Image (spheres, rainbow, N blue to C red):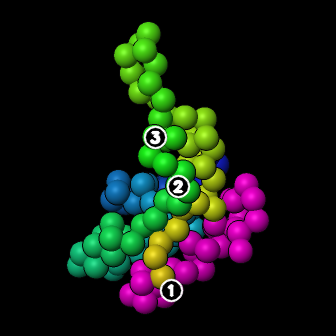
Amino acid sequence: MPEWLRPSLAQSSLKHPVAIDFFAWPTLRDRLVQNHEEIFQNGDLSKCYSEYLRFDWPFSFEDAFFYDERQGTHYPSPLFERYHRDLKYWTVDPKFYERFPEMITDIEGDRRRFSEVEVN
């Protein structure tokens, strides 16, 4: 499990909706844990997050998995796992920040902090 996906102290110690644990950025998760009663009063965040979440996979879909004929099962390719573990490749569309500008520092700060390569 990547370091950035491990539960934070706030996640481990404060009661919160389990959905927060699936947000990619730890600083954003802490914000949501601390303020979930206010932030989730309506469905705006959930709608925007599901609409604007991006995982940048620059290769073809066929490169994401391989098929093990002996097992009869598909597995993630090592290339996909490498990209998936690097927070640089997780982002939101800029339109997300139009609705939630206060979250840009949470997301972009964590992308820089946990990226395996430099984020522009």
Displayed quadrant of residue 107: bottom right
* Residue 98 screen position, x and y as percent: 43, 89
- Element type at mark 2: loop
Determine which of the numbered discs, if any, sits on residue 57 in the image: 2
**Which of the pair 59/88 is nearer the observer?**
59
Q: Is residue 109 magenta?
A: yes
Query: Identity of the amino acid at label 1?
Result: Glu
**What distance separates the C-alpha of mark 1 from that of mark 3?**
37 Å
Query: Which quadrant does the C terminus fall into?
Result: bottom right
For the point 60% across and 49% down, the residue is: 83
Tell me which label, 3 or 2, sits earlier in the chain: 2
Residue situated furthest top in the rendering: 70
For the point 68% across and 59% down, the residue is: 114
Determine which of the numbered discs, if any, sits on residue 62 in the image: 3
Query: Identity of the amino acid at label 2?
Result: Trp
Main SS of residues in magenta: helix
- Element type at mark 1: helix
Determine which of the numbered discs, if any, sits on residue 102 in the image: 1
**Which of the pair 19/96 is nearer the observer?**
96
Residue situated furthest left in the rendering: 42
**What distance separates the C-alpha of mark 3 from that of mark 2?**
11 Å
- The segment highlighted magenta reads 95-120
- Element type at mark 3: helix
Q: Within 10 angstroms of label 2, few (less than 14), some, or many (20 or more) residues?
A: some
| Circle nearer the viewer, 3 or 2 | 3
| Circle nearer the viewer, 1 or 3 | 3
